[in-house]
Image (cartoon, rainbow, N blue to C red):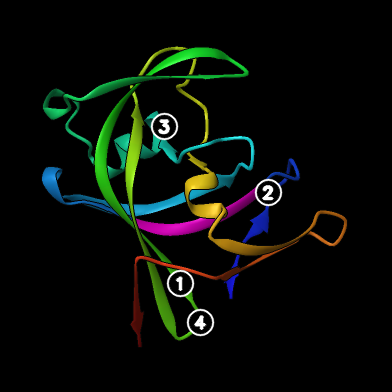
Amino acid sequence: MIVGWFDEFDRPFVECSVSIPRLRVRGTVEFLFDTGAETTSLHERDADGMGIPFAQLGLRTWSGGVGGISSYFLEPAFLLFNDGDQARIYDIDLRIAEPNQGNRLLPSLLGRDVINRWAVQYDATSRRLSCLALTADHTISF
């Protein structure tokens, strides 16, 4: 079971290891569990923490949301989630937000490109979030 938590503002989060092979960077990211996001995105605070070399980013895309249209860079990435005695690995096109004043403090978002592969128990009143990985691109047993 992949277990999440709720922060002091009652927002749901899950943690995973992110690896971006082309950039040779990796790190641990706490993603906001966002069923309204189609795709998973890394925002400035976490990108800085991972040491993302923005000068090496190239393929740009645009995404629209509640805050309007934003610019993102696309990078193939691996997301590794701890699932008890296994690791569930997802091979995705990660969106890395182009830093600006509007997204500086935003959390990174785990989107439906991953969430839709899970059975989810979401109970905000009890502050519980648990996810059963139904599919993964790779599974590693410990």
Q: Position of residue 125 (x, y in %)?
A: 88, 56
In the image, the segment drawn in magenta is 12-17
For label 4, count other residues whose C-alpha is less than 10 Å away and answer few (under 14), some (14-19) or many (20+). Answer: few
Question: Does 76 appear in magenta?
Answer: no
Which numbered marker is on residue 82?
1
Which numbered marker is on residue 7?
2
Q: Is residue 111 above or below residue 73?
A: below
- The three-letter code of the residue at mark 1 reads Asn
Please report the residue visible at 45 percent of the width from the left and 72 percent of the height from the top.
Answer: 82
- Dot 1: what SS? strand
What residue did someone put label 4 on? 84
Q: Are marks 4 and 1 in contact (CB under 8 Å)?
A: yes
- The three-letter code of the residue at mark 2 reads Asp
- Dot 4: what SS? loop
Q: Which quarter of the picture shows residue 4?
A: bottom right
- The three-letter code of the residue at mark 3 reads His
Which numbered marker is on residue 43?
3
Give the foreground label among 1 and 2: 1
Q: Earlier in the sequence, mark 3 or mark 2?
A: 2
Q: Is residue 94 above or below residue 68?
A: below
